[in-house]
Image (tube, grey):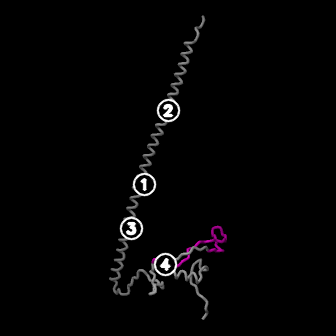
Amino acid sequence: MDEKEILKYTGAAKNLITPEWFQSQYQDPSRKEKVSVASNFRINWKNLTIHRKETNYLLGLSMESKRNPVYSQSNQWVDTEPLHINDLSNIGNPERIINYLTHQYETLQATLSSKFTKMEFEMDEKDRKISEMKSLISEIRNQMNNLTHLKAKTEKETLTEKETLTTNQTTDKETLTEKLALPTQH
């Protein structure tokens, strides 16, 4: 028998896997390691070019939520088992299968209904907040329009007062000039 070690790992980072890496994963199956993998021949089909690309991967064993880990008596991880097993082998007649599937359907429908109700509530809450914000924006716009109108009115009144003052000063100068004017000789 050949003493060659066989490593089974799929994915782009399989060249980085060593027996030591498997030993460290065996010690801590939840361990993740960030690695960078270079692909020398990546094709950009849009431009029809070939280039080198560096990609980052999170290297580790996938402990999917579909399976539970199985440990030995010495508390070592040895295997996994599925979370849900639907064993239909003991169901002999179609009526039992229909009842089972109906129950599964009703359970799923109840779950989806509660999620839908929660989403509706969240959307109503967001709609209420949007309405409040729109109302606040409208109120601020009205206040800004009132201030702009008041400012324009004040500026107009100020201009009118300046014109009146200028006219009065001109009239006063003319009157004073007339009073000071020497009597004309005939």
Q: Earlier in the sequence, mark 3 or mark 2?
A: 3
Image-quadrant location for residue 70: bottom left
Q: Residue at x 34, y 77 (%)?
A: 103
Q: Is residue 125 above or below residue 11?
A: above
Q: Earlier in the sequence, mark 4 or mark 2?
A: 4
Q: Earlier in the sequence, mark 1 or mark 3?
A: 3
Which tag is nearer the camera, tag 4 or tag 3? 4
Instruction: Residue type at mark 2: give it.
Output: Lys
Which secondary structure lies at badge 4? loop
**Numbered tag placed on residue 56 in the rendering:** none
Which tag is nearer the camera, tag 4 or tag 2? 4
Q: How many marks?
A: 4
Instruction: Residue type at mark 3: give it.
Output: Lys
Front residue of this view, candidates 100 and 152:
152
Whether label 3 touches label 2, CB < 8 Å: no
Q: Residue at x 57, y 73 (%)?
A: 34
Report which residue position mark 2 lands on.
156
Instruction: Residue type at mark 1: give it.
Output: Ile
**Numbered tag placed on residue 63 in the rendering:** 4
Give the Cα separation between the discs numbered 4 and 3: 27 Å
Q: Earlier in the sequence, mark 1 or mark 2?
A: 1
Report which residue position mark 1 lands on.
130
Q: Residue at x 54, y 77 (%)?
A: 60
